[in-house]
Amino acid sequence: MRINFRKFAWGLLVFCGPIGAVEVLDIYKDPVIIPAGPFEFAPIFEAAESYNDNIFQQDRFKKDSFLTQFHAGGQLALARQLNRYAVTYTLQSSQYHNSPQDDYIDHFVGGTSHIEFTSRNRLDVNLGYLDSHYQRGVFLGRDLIGPTGPAQPDQYHLHSADATYRYGRAEAKGNFELKFNVQDYTFQNNREFTARQDRTLFVVTPGFYFRIAPKTTLQTQVENQLIKHREAQVSGFDSTKQRFLIGGTWRYSTKTQVSARIGYLRGEFDNPKSKEFDDATWDLSASWSPLSYSSFNLNIARDVNPSIASDNLRASDRYRLGWTHNWTSRVTTQLFGSRENADNLGIKRQDDYTSFGVDLNYGIRRWLGIGINYSYRSLKSDDKELDFNQNAIMFYITGNPRISDNARTPWASWY
């Protein structure tokens, strides 16, 4: 049976009759703001109910569960001419119906600022504190070689700071940019496993941008990364890495844009017995909007990163394709798929990670949206004990969707 999504979306509008008559919704509107003297307050609230058939991402210990989650908090902002300052607090509550030992409430406090000293001097600063945890068994995205085995999730504190300084008028042909980022991880439990994961990451990236044509900008950057472990026994795995990148952005039209950074990376460990590493590296992206309400996005990247407290190197190629379509001003669908082919050079293991999904959301009001999401994830590894398949379906409701998009929080909005 073929579904006419435009008729389906129109049917939703007819069904909701009075709501549609009261407000013509624009999904790109600014968030709902509550004035508070010179400040502006934007509340954040989301709730979701989902079913996950493999919560630990391990087929060997497969366990399913319904999951109830909440995001709650708010952002307090102050604007002064071209400068803007904001403080954000959010929490994430997760309750597993079949695995209560994995229930947690995570907290985040962050501050952001955008300061324009002059038309040539601009500075963006972001500070954050996160009190959170990692799901048991999950090692992808943690730079670990394999899954952890404690009876409780690994809890950690993350202090982070990043700053971006840019010199040059926005309309000038040339701009100089300097980026700085630091992330400090301290784990709170399971110390027999997590003590070696305490670390600090520093990244400094100078760059230069030069517009050679109205729609074409060239850029060059050097990313300098340092990872320092705090436990003396693993200090030999401290590492440095540099990425030398050159590329640019080409805006062919309002519908098509292509960006690329291509270069060379090199790195080394403090332990002289560990080999130095070097490889090609790149970040490619393209966006195409054949219609004003429909867009495609493609991202391709290659990078090499060391595993935590190990001299294993993970050389990965990542691919991601997404399609977003606004059937009406209220109804939006997203299709997405990604693939990562990772070669663990130190332990000689190939990991292939696949994910895809679909999302349908409906804007009831400017301040309220609902949606349903399905996602699939799988890992195929040379180590068959790591293989897993995971299916998850979620129904969610989001208050003030646009602030959920804009606020800098560690967990993305579901909407």
Image (tube, rainbow, N blue to C red):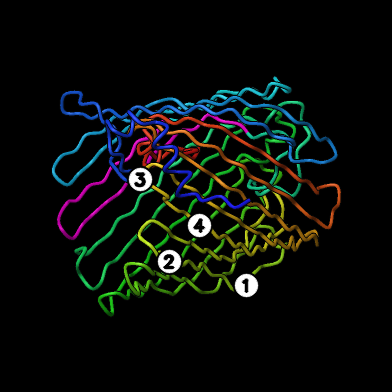
Label number found at residue 160: none
Q: How many numbered marks appear?
A: 4
- Which of pointers 1 and 2 indicates the residue nearer the eye? 2
The residues tagged by marks 1 and 4 sit, at their Cα atoms, a distance apart of 31 Å
Question: On the image, numbered disc 2 is attached to which residue?
Answer: 288
Q: Amino acid at mark 2?
A: Trp
At x 83%, y 58%, the residue is 382
Question: On the image, numbered disc 4 is attached to which residue?
Answer: 323
At x 30%, y 43%, the residue is 26
With 342 as the anchor, is 21 left or right in this view?
left
Q: Amino acid at mark 1?
A: Asp
Asked whether the beta carbons under mark 1 and mark 3 sit within 8 Å of each other, the answer is no
Can residue 131 be spotted in the picture? yes
Question: On the image, numbered disc 3 is attached to which residue?
Answer: 329
Label number found at residue 279: 1
> Of callouts 3 and 4, which one flags the residue occurring earlier in the amino acid sequence?
4
At x 19%, y 38%, the residue is 79
The residues tagged by marks 2 and 4 sit, at their Cα atoms, a distance apart of 10 Å
Give the magenta range.
Answer: 109-133
Q: Amino acid at mark 4?
A: Trp
Q: Position of residue 252 (x, y in %)?
A: 35, 75
> Of callouts 1 and 4, which one flags the residue occurring earlier in the amino acid sequence?
1
